[in-house]
Structure formats: structure tokens, C-alpha cells
Image (tube, rainbow, N blue to C red):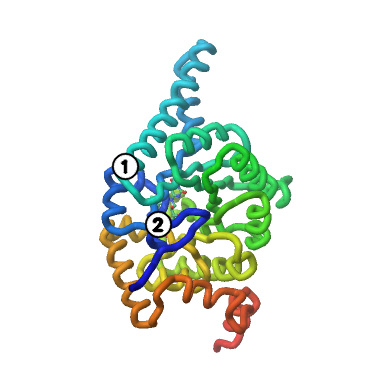
Amino acid sequence: MINIETQYAGLTLRNPLIVGSSGLTSSADRNKSFEKAGAGAIVLKSLFEEQIEMQSVILMKDTDYPEASDYIREYVKANQINNYLELIKKTKAICSIPVIASINCYKADAWIDFARQIELAGADALELNVFFMDTDLTHDYDATRALYVNIIRKVKEIVKIPVVIKVGKYFSNIPALVHILKINGADGIVLFNRFYRPDIDINTMQLVSGNVFSNHSDLSDTLRWTAIVSGKIPEISISASTGVHDWEDVIKCLLVGASTVQMCSAVYTHGAEIISQVLTCMEEWMNQAKYNSLSQFRGKLNYANIQNPGMYERSQFMKYFSNRD
Ligand SMILES: Cc1cc2nc3c(=O)[nH]c(=O)nc-3n(C[C@H](O)[C@H](O)[C@H](O)COP(=O)(O)O)c2cc1C
């Protein structure tokens, strides 16, 4: 009997497959369909701090009365939050798999109250999608890292549910970042978020949106950093995300040490059925390889467990290309 249960950031999941935060998970009924298809957990669409603030600003432009502006700002904020809390409650009412709420934030204080309300609404964990595009010439890297640390510290003071941080891959030392987040209370890390990608239309001479969805080639960075982080910081739960499109990708993520694997683009492209297909194929692979549980092969190919861990590092990558004609 194959057991594909996994532990992730203090939660027990029936399997490692998580539907990633996106519009896909913004409806309780759709979340139920993901559960029926076999998902181990879902991460709800993010509540965006930026979105709440922007809506307030737009509405405030329509009034010259400062009291009214204050009222409207609070009203808009409350309604955004209430809709989100409703989503958590409705999803929890009909789903039995863990429901992970998500907040997109880039400041260390304004939204902290949301975290408490999210916990009270019944979320099983909280994923913090922390990102800001730092392009200020006078900012230094330590300040950016301090912001992340501050956020995790403050949230952990407020909530008891597990808190996971979802980061992008644009850091100069990802293991050091994960290490300091772990020390400051992070229960897990999502490697990685994938951001809006700009492109250029040379006919209209305009900036346009690039591919919204990832593809297989995006998996490589996910594998590399999951392998390195899991090898160097085995105590932290890693959710591998970006570029996971089929069952083989899922197995690869587990082999490099992920506790869970998130899928988003693939679910957009193929629908909820991809979840059951991935699980079936994964179990077949485990059966053939004579594995009864994930722990028998998880991390087998991570940085700590392969003979030449330098393979995961950039210098080896360059050496490979320098030998090519
Ligand atoms: C249409 C769309 C909407 C998304 N919305 C969110 C979001 O609200 N919050 C978040 O943390 N990530 C969001 N993401 C990022 C995904 O959760 C995921 O991290 C990213 O797409 C990489 O995974 P994938 O390669 O499986 O698509 C979104 C992605 C897509 C494609």
C-alpha cells in the first residue's frame, strides 16, 4: 500500500500536490472541485495590500470631504477583507483538505491585522507573498532582507497557524535568506513565485504583458534552489513552485527535497483533471521503483545527498558550456 501523505509547515497533507494561489482558487466551489480531483491542499488567491489601497484612492478622488474619504477608505478595506474572509469560511465549510490563505504584502505593518482575521476565519495556514520591486539606487540589500525578516516576525507574533513565505528568485543568496527567515519563525518557504513578465511589441512600440503562464523550462531554477536549500536547511519545509507541469516534474521536486509541490499554470491549461492524472502516474512510478512512502526518496538528489553538489552551482554550469564547440 503506497502512502503519499506529507508533512508541510506543520500541516499533514494527504499528498504533496497543492493548487497554487491564483484566480483558480478564488471560488469555494472551484476549490471543492480541486479537492475532488485529489489536491492535497489549496492556497487561496492572495488578498493584495496594494489592491485594497488602490481602490481606496480611486474612490477618494470622487469626494472633497475628508471625513467621507476616511469612511470610504475604511468601507472599501472592510469589504475587501470581508469578501476574503467569506471565501475562507465557505471553502472551509465544504473542503476537508487544508486551506492556506495568502496575503500579498510589501510593508511590515499596515496589513498585520488581516493575518489575525484570516486565522479567526479558519485558515489552516498563511502564505505570505512578499514582494516589492526594489529599484531604488540608494537601497541596500540588507534593508530588503530586513523587511522580509520584520514581516515574518510581526506576523508570527500575531497568529498561531503556520506561516509560510513565498519568495521570488531574484536574491543574491537564497539559502541565506531562507535561513534567516527560518530563524525568525517561518514554518515553510515557497520557491518560487513567478511575477508579471513584461515584453515589447515592436510593431506598436508598446510595453505588453509577456507569457502569463510558465513552461517546463522554468522548472530548472526551482529544482536547483530547492535542492540547495533543502540540503543546507533540512529543517524547513519547502514547497516547490514554478514550472511544475506534469507528474515527472512533481517527482523531480520531491527528489530534490520539496515537501510539497504547487501547480498553477498547468491547472489553468489542463483543468482540475491534471491533479488526478499526476497522482495516478506518481503512484505508478513509486510502485515500479518499490517506494511505499515519499520519505523513501524525498531529498535523495538534494545538495546534501548527491556526490557532486557543485552540479547545482553556477560555476559548474558555466564549465559545461565552455566545453561545448
Ligand atoms: C493568472 C495567475 C494569477 C496568479 N495570482 C497569484 C496570487 O494572487 N498570489 C500569488 O501568490 N501568486 C499568484 N500567482 C502565481 C502562482 O501562484 C505561481 O506561483 C506561479 O504561477 C508559478 O507556478 P506555475 O509555474 O505552476 O504557474 C498567479 C499566477 C497566475 C498565472
Q: In this view, does 12 lie above or below 296?
A: above
Query: Residue 206, position in %: x, y?
Result: 44, 48
Q: Residue at x 52, y 44 (%)?
A: 161
Asked if residue 213 can be seen in this view, the reply is: no
- Which residue type does callout 2 highlight? Ile
Q: Which residue is drawn at 52% across and 35% down?
A: 116
Where the N terminus falls, by quadrant? bottom left
Query: Residue 6, position in %: x, y?
Result: 44, 62
Which of pointers 1 and 2 lies earlier in the amino acid sequence?
2
Q: Residues within 10 Å of mark 2 (few under 14, many from 20)?
A: many
Q: Are marks 1 and 2 in contact (CB under 8 Å)?
A: no
Query: Residue 177, position in %: x, y?
Result: 65, 57
Asked if residue 160 can be seen in this view, the reply is: yes
Q: Which residue is drawn at 45% across and 21% down?
A: 75
Label 1 and label 2: CA atoms lie apart by 16 Å
Quarter of image, res 12:
bottom left
Query: Residue 294, position in %: x, y?
Result: 44, 71
Where the C terminus falls, by quadrant? bottom right
Residue 171 vs residue 247, the one in the foreground: 247
Mark 2 residue element: strand
- The residue labelled by disc 1 is 27
Q: Cβ(mark 1) to ligand 1 < 8 Å?
A: no
Q: Which residue is drawn at 63% across and 79% down?
A: 310
93 relative to 300 in the view: left or right: left
184 relative to 39 in the view: left or right: right
Q: Is residue 108 above or below residue 216?
A: above
- The residue labelled by disc 2 is 18
239 relative to 212 in the view: left or right: right
Mark 1 residue element: loop
Q: Which mark is residue 280?
A: none
